[in-house]
């Protein structure tokens, strides 16, 4: 049977509590920020080192 | 037939309610701050100009690497953390973070911190950071801590490495100066942690951790604290007559060393009652100030020299 867009059935499987949703959202934002910092860091160091960024001393 | 489907219960995933603060607690922020500070000193005393972006990158990687080591330590020690009043509030014993979540978090941060330091700064610093994490997690936490009373003596090497990593990040090499800083922290670690262990010995005994006061008794520990404090004071002054650090550092080190010895002598003398407990706590508190002041002196000297050279 086809379902409609306004199907009001309860979702199957695990339903997160409000606290779980809130903490998941907080963690997701933190991960996004960390990845953003990593991108900015790599960009900034590339700018500082210039084209020699891949020719570093061992 | 059972009404409860045990299979489904076992397979149902645990939904985490851990927030960002719980994950920050896994990083041991107070330990991390000391690591960053000592690494900063190792970095700035290096006789090379370091671009601020590179210095920031190095310190960030060292901080994250130290945090990773802390998280992995908490993952492995969650059973004994739950038995000790000092650590029972950590995220894993409190049930906020599952052990496997802490393991994944620590491993991820360890990988990214080492790779980022290696790729962006240099591989000597990256390798040293990897070795530091390995030494703290595997050698200290997994091998030594539950087996020998010398756990914090040998394991102290991990805590002593950050200034060496900082120097390596700045110069791409190693030298005598960072090794002197290594030795200072190495010999500082036993009196610092044994002072803590003296007034937390019940905690350690309950958790089955063979700290020196638990295994050898408080009097033997007091003697060891005194002996290590004598060695520490001598090692900390040595860079001055050897010509590596100047007189300002030398005199500061002499004064701080004398004070450290006075506190250690008090711990050795006062063995009973509230006075003994107070002497131990004072030594513990002063030992933190001692290391901070010693390294801050080196930092201030470098900054003062840079300011003076820019003025003249």
Image: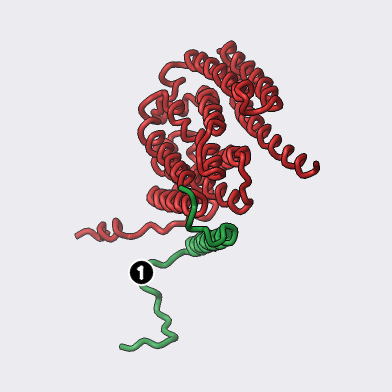
Q: Residue furthest top?
A: B269
Please count the marks in the image: 1
Would residue B59 be seen by someone viewing this image from the given angle? yes
Q: Residue at x 44, y 21 (%)?
A: B212
The chain under label 1 reads A
For residue A12, side relative to residue B67 (left or right): left
- Coloring scheme used: by chain
Q: Position of residue B84 (x, y in %)?
A: 46, 33
Q: Position of residue B48 (x, y in %)?
A: 61, 43
Chain B takes which shade in the image? Answer: red
Q: Residue furthest left?
A: B1
Which of B264/B307 is in front? B307
Q: Position of residue B7 (x, y in %)?
A: 25, 58
Is the residue marked by circle 1 packed among few (<14), some (14-19), or many (20+) residues within 10 Å? few
| Residue B282, quarter of picture | top right
Q: Chain drawn green, letter?
A: A
| Residue B217, quarter of picture | top left
B123 w.r.t. B201: above or below: below
B18 w.r.t. B188: above or below: below
Q: Residue at x 61, y 14 (%)?
A: B266
**Helix, strand or loop at mark 1:** loop
Would residue B98 be seen by someone viewing this image from the given angle? no
B307 w.r.t. B269: above or below: below
Which of B33/B101 is in front? B33
Q: Residue at x 55, y 27 (%)?
A: B184
Q: Residue at x 59, y 12 (%)?
A: B270
Quadrant where the N terminus of chain A is found in the figure: bottom left
Q: Position of residue B166 (x, y in %)?
A: 55, 41
For residue B298, side relative to residue B36 (left or right): right
Residue labelled with disc 1: A13
């Amino acid at each position: 049977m086809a379902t409609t867009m306004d199907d009001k059935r309860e979702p199957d499987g695990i339903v997160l509590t409000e606290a779980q949703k809130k903490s998941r959202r907080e963690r997701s934002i933190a991960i996004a920020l960390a990845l953003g910092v990593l991108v900015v860091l790599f960009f900034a160091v590339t700018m500082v080192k210039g084209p020699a960024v891949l020719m570093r001393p061992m | 037939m059972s009404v409860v489907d045990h299979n489904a219960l076992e397979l149902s995933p645990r939904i985490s309610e851990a927030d960002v603060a719980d994950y920050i607690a896994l990083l041991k922020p107070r330990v991390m701050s000391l690591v960053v500070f000592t690494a900063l000193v190792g970095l700035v005393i290096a006789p090379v100009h370091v671009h601020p972006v590179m210095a920031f990158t190095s310190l960030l990687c060292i901080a994250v690497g130290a945090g990773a080591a802390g998280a992995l330590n908490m993952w492995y020690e969650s059973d004994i953390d739950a038995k000790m009043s000092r650590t029972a509030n950590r995220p894993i014993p409190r049930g906020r973070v599952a052990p496997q979540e802490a393991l994944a978090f620590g491993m991820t941060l360890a990988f990214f911190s080492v790779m980022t330091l290696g790729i962006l700064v240099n591989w000597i610093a990256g390798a040293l950071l990897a070795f530091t994490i390995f030494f703290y997690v595997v050698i200290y936490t997994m091998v030594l801590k539950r087996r020998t009373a010398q756990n914090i003596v040998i394991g102290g090497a991990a805590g002593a490495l950050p200034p060496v990593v900082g120097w390596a990040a700045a110069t791409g090499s190693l030298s005598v100066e960072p090794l002197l800083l290594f030795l200072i922290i190495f010999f500082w670690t036993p009196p610092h942690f044994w002072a803590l262990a003296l007034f937390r010995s019940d905690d350690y005994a309950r958790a089955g951790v063979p700290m020196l006061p638990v295994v050898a008794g408080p009097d033997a520990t007091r003697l060891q604290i005194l002996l290590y404090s004598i060695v520490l004071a001598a090692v900390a002054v040595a860079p001055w007559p050897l010509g590596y650090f100047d007189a300002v550092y030398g005199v500061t080190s002499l004064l701080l060393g004398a004070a450290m010895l006075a506190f250690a002598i008090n711990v050795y003398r006062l063995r009973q009652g509230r006075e003994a407990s107070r002497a131990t706590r004072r030594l513990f508190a002063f030992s933190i100030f001692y290391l901070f002041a010693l390294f801050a002196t080196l930092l201030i000297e470098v900054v003062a020299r840079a300011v003076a050279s820019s003025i003249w």
